[in-house]
Image: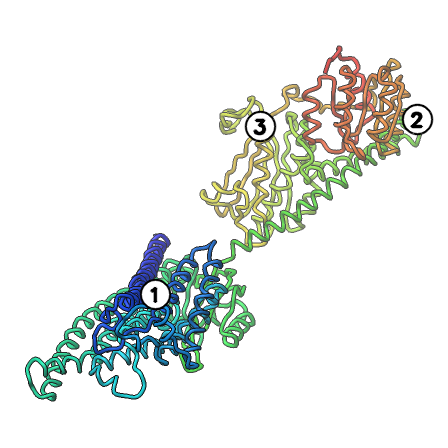
Amino acid sequence: MPAVMQGASGDRELSQMVTLTARSGSMLNAVKGVCIPGVAVMAALAGLGWVFDLRVLAAFHHDYLPMAPASAVLFIAMTVSLLMLELARPKGESTRYRLLVLPFACVILAVAVLRLAGVGWAGEFAAISRIPVSFQADWNMTYLTAAMFTVIAVALFLLAAGEEFGRRRLLQAGSLMSVPVIAVALSALTGYVHGGTLLYEGESMPQALTTAVTFLLAGVAITAVAGPDVWPASVMTGSGIRVRLTQVFLPLTIAIVLFSDMLAVATVDWSGAQPTIASSVAMAAFIIIVVAVVQLVSREVAVSIRQHEASKQKAEAKYRDLFEDSLDAVFIMDPDWRLVELNRAGVDFFGFSSKAALAKAQPSILDIFSDENAAGVFCGQLAGTGLIRDYEARMRCRDGGEVEVALTAVAESDGNNGVASYRGVIRDITEKRLLERQLVQAQKMESIGRLAGGVAHDFNNLLTAIQGYTELALMEMPLDSGVRADLVQVRESADRAAALTRQLLLFSRRQQMDLKTVNLNRTVAEMERMLARVVGEQYVISTRLDVDLWLAEADSVLMGQVLMNLVVNARDAMAGGGRITISTGNAIPGQDGALAAPLEAPGDHYVRLSVEDTGVGMDEETVGRIFEPFFSTKEQGQGTGLGLSVVYGIVSEHGGWVEVESVPGRGTTFDIYIPASQESQGGAREATAGDASEYFSGNDELVLLVEDEERVRRLAAETLARHGYRVVDVPDAEAAHDLFLLRGDEIDLLFTDIVLPGESGVALATRLVGLKPGLRVLLASGYSGEQLKEEFISSHDGAAFLQKPYRLGALLEQVRTLLDRGPDNG
């Protein structure tokens, strides 16, 4: 709401400024609309007076001098020049019109300068006009008039240049040229008002009354054309009190000076009173007028003052609203660094109960900084430079907590080179910095994940060769050989290494779930020693494993991660040591004490994995949030808050669920329920698909083998060749494509690695299947989650995938299975 109010107030202020600017412009336009035509009318009347021998048109009075014909001509030229300047203001034609000002200004300047040099045109006008006027002796302009026309010509040059080049100083100089013109005109008019006949008693010829009036109009017109931003027009436009007083009293002062004596003379003429009495009457009349005007002006000034005070109060209220409604902590400190005022956000930020509590405590900002050195740097820089921006530090709140903040502050001067106070803003950036650290951590983990994925891929190629050649050696080795046991150890070690690479791939998110029948008792037994090392000697790990445990349909690596996360969570719940109990069992929802399964849970037989601790336990509110990502009851920096959310995600992906039982002060138990394998309920041995003893021989089919790793390529080719297949092997997709163009009709199956130099194995398979729709395709990779691979296999019935590192039996089984399928048209 304050932002909306502020926007509306700003719109009103902008509207008022636009209105005032429009008023100033309209007033100057009105002045120009009167004065420029007025100059032309006065010059035209003088010209008509000369043509028709009507002295009153050129002089206003038979006793006064008429306007000289040359003056009338120059006034017309000046009028045209001012009109050109006005027409030049719209864009597009500005330069053309301003150039037209120059010849007229040159004519005015030339005639005026020649007259000042003593050249006259009375005889010439009389000779060429052939008009028998009665006042031909008055045709020459006075020297004073010529001087004023010289000034006007210079003013026209300056105004044209200022408009053309956008130079305000030139416009100001041109506008100043109007001042002597107006002053001389007013002096002449004052002389006429105070007794015109006296003007003609000297030796020099006075300025004509009509000429003086026209010069007055011309000077005002030049001021108006120069614009409202230059002096003297600037003091007469706008809406301030000073401008309003000037608008009222300047004309009033001129009127008093011009007409006070005139009123006195008129009083003497009308009443026959003595001049002193007449002057007193005139003075009294003007005093009454001035008092009346002052009364009117004072009312307007009072209204303006009230409006100013109202605007000031509104601005103060707006500032107060901004101060109080700011979401950041806004503070004011005295020169001794004591907090003397805080907005509402600041009061809440520092934990004061109210502003009254703040006023009573008046804490020093030095005491709020967590680090004394940081406080010293902040105060030193602020005192030294008077300004500090986005200074980051840690601050203590009254509840004992710490927050990260960014401070911006400025010193307010007391007017005597001292500091009256410091004003500033404190922004809580704790969450921002936490998010930044999480982003950095996420980017770091992503980089590590990429590295881990690449390493795992290379390891899988090596392990494929190690496992394969070990199996080949075992195939050739007699059963009673003493070396056979060593080779079995090599193969089992390679199997364990393959499991490690699967964890790396899982970490890098390049491994999909590999669901198999898993004995969770074996998972616990294999991890028990490692878990003991992880938790430390002060913790005791015990197990209660059901000997008749069903096999679970699960990913053994992911189940290991679930167990690890639960045990680490149990350790963290027991700061001084304790007992962790891991147990397993069979569960049928609704029986054997197991709670009812969720509605979406598949099947009715489950395997339970439980982890129990003797820690501090949790209340109901905490239990309700423990599976939220990034939720943690640990201190900042001692956990990511992802451990239990990962557990929840893995169990849910398996179609299971998690139950939590916790009592504050007594401990917590996590029960994990995983669907049991359909074929193993009631006890069954774990599947051993892909054992090396199960081989599937070929029938002289031709296999195109594409593998960039030479050892793996040689192993696969040798294995297939030993078991009845013909093999042609190449290291990359380009060579495979060229070979297929030559022998495509013979090739029965494409066996290719997915990750190849240049074109990928999936792209190669797509191209070759396009050339031969019935081609069988076996894809292999150290990764398992490539989207393109999944799309290819789902759209081609004659395609399959083999995970590296693979057993030779699994390779032979996959090849035989694909070749034994019926015809496929892709």
Instruction: Check disc 1: other Cα within 10 Å, few if <14, some if 14-19, many if 20+.
Output: some
Res. 174 visible in picture: yes
Res. 359 visible in picture: no
Q: Answer left or right for 285 relative to 405.
A: left
Alpha carbons under labels 3 and 1: distance apart: 56 Å
Q: Residue 118, located in which quarter of the rendered image?
A: bottom left
The single residue placed furthest to the top in the displayed view is 822
Instruction: Check disc 3: other Cα within 10 Å, few if <14, some if 14-19, many if 20+.
Output: some
Give above or below for 158 relative to 514.
below
Q: Which residue is mark 1?
A: 355
Q: Position of residue 337 (x, y in %)?
A: 45, 74
Give above or below for 729 relative to 413.
above
Q: Position of residue 794 (x, y in %)?
A: 67, 21
Q: Earlier in the sequence, mark 3 or mark 1?
A: 1
Q: Which mark is residue 655?
A: 3
Nearer-the-camera pick, 337 or 808: 337
Which residue appears at 58% of the width and 23% of the height? 605
Which residue appears at 51% of the width and 57% of the height? 429
Q: What's the amino acid at mark 2?
A: Met
Q: Position of residue 382 (x, y in %)?
A: 50, 73
- Mark 2 or 1: the one toward you: 1
Q: What's the amino acid at mark 3?
A: Gly
Q: Which residue is mark 2?
A: 477
- Mark 3 or 2: the one toward you: 3
Q: Earlier in the sequence, mark 3 or mark 2?
A: 2
Q: Earlier in the sequence, mark 2 or mark 1?
A: 1
Q: Answer left or right for 813 relative to 729.
A: left
Instruction: Check disc 2: other Cα within 10 Å, few if <14, some if 14-19, many if 20+.
Output: some
Q: Residue 815, located in which quarter of the rendered image?
A: top right
Q: Residue 629, located in which quarter of the rendered image?
A: top right
Marks 2/1 in contact by CB < 8 Å: the verdict is no
